[in-house]
Image: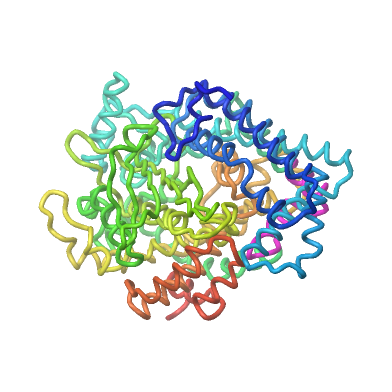
């Protein structure tokens, strides 16, 4: 073992500052070999297969590999560069091959199968039963029963897919980074808030350029689309954003989209499934593409009339205000914001002074403290990968260590866009020691300027609460096995803890804890709280239709045979037809930058955001019936949902928490799509 390589030493906290880029590849290759030896020991054991010497041994194998790869791929998302991306391209096929070597290991599968076949005679608890079932299924669902020649084909598919997904993401990031809109004439910036212009001027200065620079990063793109009076500039920015990966150049993703969709289909067929969606959904609450399709169409039926009414209202408003004859996609956020101001006299610029980032962080910590008795103390002796990252020690009421929490809030060139929760170390119990998790949230929020601290839009506030909900799922995990811990749950259940926490952003009792003016310390006025609540359903029909359109696009790629698709754009137009409101933009394509499904883990699973909204609305209704800081309901939620991870079927956990199965009514009531 290379003693000079910090990643191969024993560590608890990730030793970021000591890691050199050239350490990653040899460390991962060595960790793969260590994991191989551990698998060989299980397979070559002369003892009869038992739950302990086979299932548990397999579960705790590869720990070094898990730690090192989690650090590497998290860095590849949050602080990457060309060298790291190159290493990722080299290592992904190696890791894919190793994963297949385990899954397709005949000796290992034989041992697991022999235990699985006599499981009813073993005295296993619920978590052990789930581990056995999941491990057995992981083998059978991924080719353990295939003939050798078919297993060889499967390996080739997996290798290629791992590279294609990385390439897809790299192209989107490169497209985002290479575009900038430089404006040198201030008269063209009418409507933009001063603080936003200051940030754009800072960006220009940092690049030694004149005027103001706007980019495709969310904190730049979204406010520009919302406030810029200049329709032509909005159009230019929207066209740049919507055409990422769709330029027929070296960063084009059309071929990657087609190849990924077709390979996933072939892989599913090889494994005996009708489509990639059939393969994926077998391990989801929704179970089948037919159920997902039915769910999306039921929601569409309820949302479409409302969306069409809202669209007409928005169209008439734009016509009356500015003589716009046909509303385009680059008008959506702008006139939506103007109409919202007219109806509610409320906009982000009025709210932002009350949402200083540090206050919102303190607020979400206080909410967690009131619900779950958690305390967060910022610590400065934990290594981090960038100076912007904050680190917090999380303890319970008795001072026991619960978790380490990293938070990384602002955009950088090496960070992909969006927001996510991730894990550097899972929670699990081994040798009677409850190893506590290291959890991180990564966001892209408005940066502080020379004149102002980081002031969040209300949407950024809800995003922070959302990601923190995921983080609580990771932090409060309390299971024996790492693969069943925290957010290792069905993907259409994983959004429940995150989406339910967003509800606290709309409640007076919660807002008063942290929404204080950054200059005066004055609490957010009651009038604003009322308007936040009132405007929560503003254009909700259109927003629901938009979400459904993404879910339907996802299914259109993954629930059918895509072999005949030759034109990505044409395919997309057809998929969007049932949800279409705006005229199509020929030069734009969503699929070529739809990272959730072509790079992330949401393929055949984008519907899960809406599915989880049903669960979250039903859950929050339970809280409101008993008080939003009810310890009794919070304890139930922690005990049955947050701490249990994937140890039982999610519907069983949910029913134990709620006393019944969820129905869409609470969501439809909350969204104003049916009467209360």
Which sits in the foreground, 437 or 413? 437
For this view, does 73 lie left or right of residue 519? right
Which sits in the foreground, 223 or 304? 223
Farthest residue toward the front? 47
Q: Residue at x 70, y 40 (%)?
A: 99
Q: Is residue 428 on the magenta stretch? A: no
Display coloring? rainbow
- Residue 576 coordinates in the image, percent (x, y): 61, 53
Farthest residue toward the left? 520
Q: Determine if residue 204 is in view.
A: yes
Quadrant that contains the N terminus: top right
Which sits in the foreground, 579 or 71? 71
- Residue 347 coordinates in the image, percent (x, y): 27, 55
- Residue 309 coordinates in the image, percent (x, y): 46, 66
Q: Residue at x 41, y 62 (%)?
A: 539
Quadrant that contains the C terminus: bottom left
Task: Work out whether 183 lies above or below 611.
Answer: above
Magenta range is: 262-289
Task: Work out whether 327 lies above or below 4.
Answer: below
Q: Residue at x 54, y 56 (%)?
A: 485
Q: Determine if residue 318 is in view.
A: no
For this view, does 423 lie left or right of residue 288? left
Q: Is residue 274 on the magenta stretch? A: yes
- Residue 658 coordinates in the image, percent (x, y): 50, 77
For residue 89, what is the image quadrant? top right
Counting the numbered discs, the total is 0
């Amino acid at each position: 073992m290379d003693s000079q390589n910090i990643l191969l030493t024993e560590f608890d906290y990730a030793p970021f500052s000591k890691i050199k880029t050239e350490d990653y590849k040899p460390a991962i290759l060595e960790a793969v070999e260590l994991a191989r030896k551990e698998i060989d020991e299980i397979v070559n054991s002369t003892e009869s297969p038992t739950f302990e010497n086979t299932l548990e041994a397999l579960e705790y194998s590869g720990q070094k590999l898990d730690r090192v790869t989690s650090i590497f791929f998290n860095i590849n998302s949050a602080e990457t560069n060309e060298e790291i991306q190159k290493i990722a391209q080299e290592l992904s096929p190696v890791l894919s091959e190793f994963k297949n070597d385990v899954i397709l290991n005949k000796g290992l599968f034989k041992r697991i199968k022999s235990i699985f076949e006599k499981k009813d005679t073993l005295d296993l608890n619920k978590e052990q039963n789930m581990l056995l079932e999941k491990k057995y299924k992981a083998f059978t669902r991924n080719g353990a029963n295939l003939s050798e020649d078919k297993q060889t084909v499967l390996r080739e598919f997996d290798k290629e897919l791992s590279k294609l997904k990385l390439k897809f993401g790299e192209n989107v990031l490169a497209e985002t980074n290479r575009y900038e809109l430089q404006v040198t004439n201030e008269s063209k910036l009418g409507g933009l808030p001063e603080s936003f212009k200051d940030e754009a001027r800072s960006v220009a200065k940092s690049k030694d350029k004149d005027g103001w620079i706007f980019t495709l990063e969310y904190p730049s793109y979204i406010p520009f689309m919302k406030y810029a009076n200049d329709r032509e500039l909005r159009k230019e920015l929207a066209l740049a954003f919507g055409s990422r990966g769709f330029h027929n150049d070296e960063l084009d993703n059309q071929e990657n989209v087609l190849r990924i969709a077709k390979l996933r289909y072939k892989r599913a067929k090889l494994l005996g499934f009708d489509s990639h969606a059939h393969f994926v959904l077998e391990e989801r609450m929704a179970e089948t593409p037919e159920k997902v399709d039915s769910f999306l169409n039921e929601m569409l039926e309820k949302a479409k009339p409302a969306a069409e009414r809202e669209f007409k209202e928005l169209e008439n408003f734009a016509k009356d205000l500015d003589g716009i004859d046909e509303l385009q996609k680059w008008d959506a956020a702008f006139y939506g914001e103007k109409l919202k101001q007219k109806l509610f006299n409320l906009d982000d610029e009025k709210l932002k002074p009350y949402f200083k980032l540090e206050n919102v962080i303190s607020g979400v910590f206080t909410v967690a403290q009131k619900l779950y008795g958690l305390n967060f103390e910022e610590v400065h002796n934990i290594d981090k990968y960038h100076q912007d990252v904050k680190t917090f020690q999380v303890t319970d009421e008795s001072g026991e260590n619960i978790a380490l929490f990293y938070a990384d809030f602002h955009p950088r060139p090496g960070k992909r866009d969006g927001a996510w929760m991730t894990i550097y170390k899972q929670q699990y119990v081994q040798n009677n020691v409850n190893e506590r998790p290291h959890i991180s949230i990564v966001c892209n929020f408005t940066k502080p300027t020379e004149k102002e601290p980081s002031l969040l839009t209300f949407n950024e506030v809800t995003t922070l609460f959302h990601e923190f909900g995921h983080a609580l799922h990771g932090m409060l995990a309390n299971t024996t096995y790492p693969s069943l811990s925290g957010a290792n749950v069905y993907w259409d259940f994983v959004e429940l803890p995150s989406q339910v926490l967003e509800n606290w952003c709309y409640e007076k009792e919660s807002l008063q804890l942290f929404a204080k003016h950054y200059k005066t310390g004055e609490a957010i006025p009651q009038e604003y709280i009322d308007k936040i609540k009132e405007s929560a359903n503003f254009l909700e029909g259109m927003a629901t239709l938009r979400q459904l359109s993404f879910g339907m696009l996802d299914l259109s790629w993954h629930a059918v045979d895509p072999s005949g698709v030759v034109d990505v754009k044409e395919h997309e137009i057809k998929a969007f037809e049932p949800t279409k409101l705006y005229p199509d933009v020929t030069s734009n394509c969503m699929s070529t930058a739809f990272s959730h499904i072509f790079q992330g883990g949401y393929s055949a699973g984008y519907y899960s955001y809406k599915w989880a909204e049903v669960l979250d609305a039903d859950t929050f209704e339970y809280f409101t019936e008993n008080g939003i800081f009810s310890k009794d309901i919070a304890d139930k939620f922690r005990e049955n949902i947050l701490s249990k991870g994937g140890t039982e079927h999610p519907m069983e956990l949910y029913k134990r928490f709620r006393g019944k199965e969820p129905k869409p009514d609470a969501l439809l009531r909350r969204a104003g799509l049916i009467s209360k």
